[in-house]
Amino acid sequence: MIRFTPRDTDPPEWRVRLEASRISAEQKVKSFEHLGFQADHVVLPPHVSREQFAELLDNYSTDPDTRAIIVQFPPPAALRAHVAHHLDPAKDLDALLKDRSPYPACATAEGIYRVAEPFATDNPRIAVVGSKGFVGQGVMSMLHANGHDPMALDYGDKLEHVRDADIVISVTGNPGILTPDHIQPHHRVVIDSGFVPQADGSVRGDVRPEAYGIPQNLTPVPGGIGPVEMATLMERIIRQEVDPNVTPWKVTAGPYLDRAQFTAATATSAHQRTTMTTPAATPQAIASANWLPGAPNPAAATPPTPTAPPATNPRLPRQHSAPPPQLPPRGSDGPTL
């Protein structure tokens, strides 16, 4: 597990990204060690040279006892090319090498797709916000590979287009970029992959808090996609080293109304308000919780039978001060956490 530390003079945005990288790396180390693997957590200082980074990757790539290598993104721009040139593709557990990796996408992207999949059995409209980024490209690739035609949105595009989607996936890392103007009650699930640490110790996602109660289902931040990423990495290493036939983990979709059901429920509730009859469950009430509480008025189409939500995922560890950056001696295996 290789990650980088910022300089004191680096821009705040870069320091925030590396802080998120630190939290993610520490969670991965804990997860691997929980399964009984030894995890070397190598923390590189901001002044690490190209030669030192390349040698470190070469050492781990050629070491037969090292079974997997993860370079936490984002690495400094000057070092990114060395990941492609010095990382053994067979040990690329997080698909940093893309087409040369044994895996279809990074663990975060695969996890996002697997969360979206049970909500997308009827070929719904899917919007991917941040589609040109590293994770976004992986999500787009997996959606295309499985027969979907997602709406790609990135810098310069009009975010209002997400209103037309049935499923919204946001991977920008831009806190609060999606507001109540974008999130709609007919959205059957909004998957928020944003994870931006704040100065007060909290974490913000791509969706603004005031929009949390609008969609029918929403992944939380933290505790949503982060644990899903860990589950994907753990499954990969177990399949590689322990059991090639391990059963893949799956997500059970929370109850939702498809577009036709939602439209029918909206029309029914509007009619009830007009005739001053006792209202049934309205779409607004349905969207007020992550899990739909029950069926709408019998005049509307019957939604899928509600199922219990999956068990709560473990939260990411609380933030704490990072250890002093240490560069492993040349030729060494690096410090062990």
Image (cartoon, helix red, strand yellow):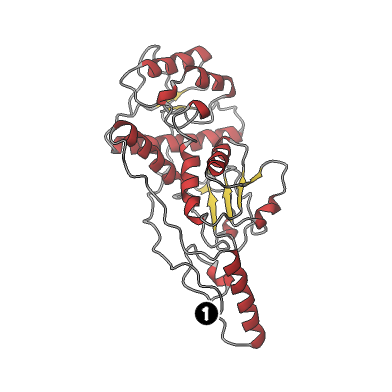
Query: Which residue is painted at 50% across and 21% down in the image?
Result: 83
Instruction: Count all numbered tags in the image, as a single digit.
Output: 1
Query: Which residue is painted at 62% across and 83% down in the image?
Result: 272
Q: Which is nearer the eye, 257 or 181? A: 257
Query: Which residue is painted at 53% across and 26% down in the image?
Result: 75
Pointer 1: what residue?
A: 298
Q: Please tell me how crowded label 1 is: few (under 14), some (14-19), or many (20+) other residues with Cα within 10 Å.
A: few
Query: Which residue is painted at 51% across and 31% down in the image?
Result: 73
Residue 130 placed where, x, y %?
Answer: 62, 42
Where does the N terminus fall, quadrant-wise?
A: top left
Residue 52 placed where, x, y %?
Answer: 47, 14
Q: Quadrant of residue 215?
A: bottom right
Above or below: residue 258 compared with residue 194: below
Above or below: residue 181 compared with residue 316: below
Kind of residue at badge 1: Pro
Q: Which is nearer the eye, 203 or 71? A: 71
Whether residue 263 is visible: yes
